[in-house]
């Protein structure tokens, strides 16, 4: 288990940032992220977003018209169309292992690394909002999702990162929470909602103004005081 100290959201322009602080949550479709143009290094484009499964050549046998294919060049990937219609809202997460909190003096360096925000996150924009009361933010998101009628088809949690050159298997109902290790620096926490619709429109939620639990930062480089988090003052 991991304990969350803060969320960070980066925006391209001031209007988007103010909309967020006013409580307007825009949840784009998963297809929006998988279709973005650019390299993975730009922190956005992810052609492997929410794969249903990935199989290494050594772990599968493929037969076509009775002939077994023996020269498979790379991993075999599959996806479910329904996953492309999921709505996502993503946040950078400053989180550490619960075990580190049991003895913070001995784990100070590891905890500081956990809370570090990589410079790559600055590629997402120039406006930064730090959510310092993460539990209240989660509660408000859950309440808004339930009010919109999607409480039974929503999930939230940390993204897990895998090596596409070695991982073999299916992701099941956690497909939207699985990304390649190229994106591990994003340390994402995601809210995922299935509205059972198939257009390209985003889901827009209103969770109410959040300026009481979040603040504008003049830098992406969030600093956490290890001394103030030992008293279970984090999610």
Image (cartoon, rainbow, N blue to C red):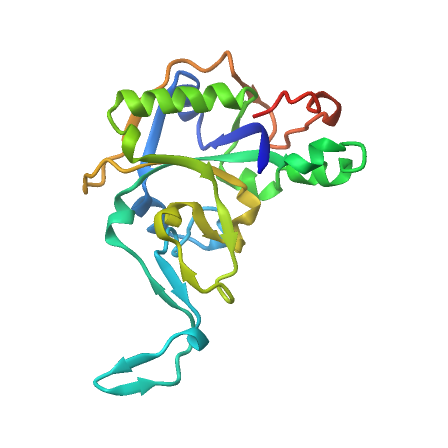
Q: Residue furthest right?
A: 106
* Residue sitting at x 38%, y 56%: 47
- Residue 73: tell me if it is visible: yes
22 left or right of 136 in image: left
- Residue 116: tell me if it is visible: no
Relative to the observer, which residue lies in front, 200 or 135? Answer: 135
Relative to the observer, which residue lies in front, 88 or 64? Answer: 64
Point out the image quarter for the N terminus: top right
Q: How many marks?
A: 0
Q: Answer above or below: position of 19 versus 39.
A: above
96 left or right of 34 in image: right
Relative to the observer, which residue lies in front, 7 or 229? Answer: 229
* Residue sitting at x 62%, y 41%: 118
* Residue sitting at x 69%, y 20%: 231
Q: Please identify the quarter of the rendering in which residue 55 is found.
A: bottom left
Where residue 29 appears, as percent x and y from the top left, is: 30, 41
Q: Answer above or below: position of 128 versus 136.
A: below
* Residue sitting at x 57%, y 21%: 132
Q: Please identify the quarter of the rendering in which residue 210 is found.
A: top left
Where residue 119 appears, as percent x and y from the top left, is: 61, 41
Q: Residue furthest bottom?
A: 67
Point out the image quarter for the C terminus: top right
Q: Answer above or below: position of 156 versus 141.
A: below
Where residue 53 appears, as percent x and y from the top left, is: 37, 60
Where residue 212 appears, as percent x and y from the top left, is: 50, 11
């Amino acid at each position: 288990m991991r304990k969350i100290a803060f969320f960070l959201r980066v925006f391209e322009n001031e209007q988007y940032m103010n909309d967020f602080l006013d409580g307007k949550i825009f949840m784009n479709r998963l297809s929006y992220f998988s279709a973005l143009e650019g390299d993975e290094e730009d922190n956005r484009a992810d052609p492997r977003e929410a794969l249903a499964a990935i199989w290494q050549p050594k772990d599968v046998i493929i037969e076509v018209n009775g002939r077994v294919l023996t020269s498979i060049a790379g991993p075999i990937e599959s996806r479910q169309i329904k996953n492309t219609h999921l709505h996502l809202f993503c946040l950078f997460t400053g989180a550490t292992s619960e075990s580190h909190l049991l003895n913070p003096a001995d784990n100070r360096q590891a905890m500081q690394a956990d809370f570090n925000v990589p410079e790559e996150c600055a590629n997402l924009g120039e406006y930064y909002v730090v959510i310092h009361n993460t539990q209240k933010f989660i509660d408000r998101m859950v309440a808004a999702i339930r009010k919109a009628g999607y409480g039974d088809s929503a999930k939230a949690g940390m993204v897990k990162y895998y090596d596409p050159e070695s991982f073999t298997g299916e992701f099941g109902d956690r497909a939207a929470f699985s990304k390649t290790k190229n994106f591990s620096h994003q340390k994402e926490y995601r809210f995922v909602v299935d509205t059972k619709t198939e257009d390209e429109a985003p889901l827009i939620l209103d969770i109410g103004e959040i300026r009481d639990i979040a603040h504008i930062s003049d830098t992406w480089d969030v600093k956490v005081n290890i001394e103030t988090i030992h008293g279970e003052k984090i999610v």
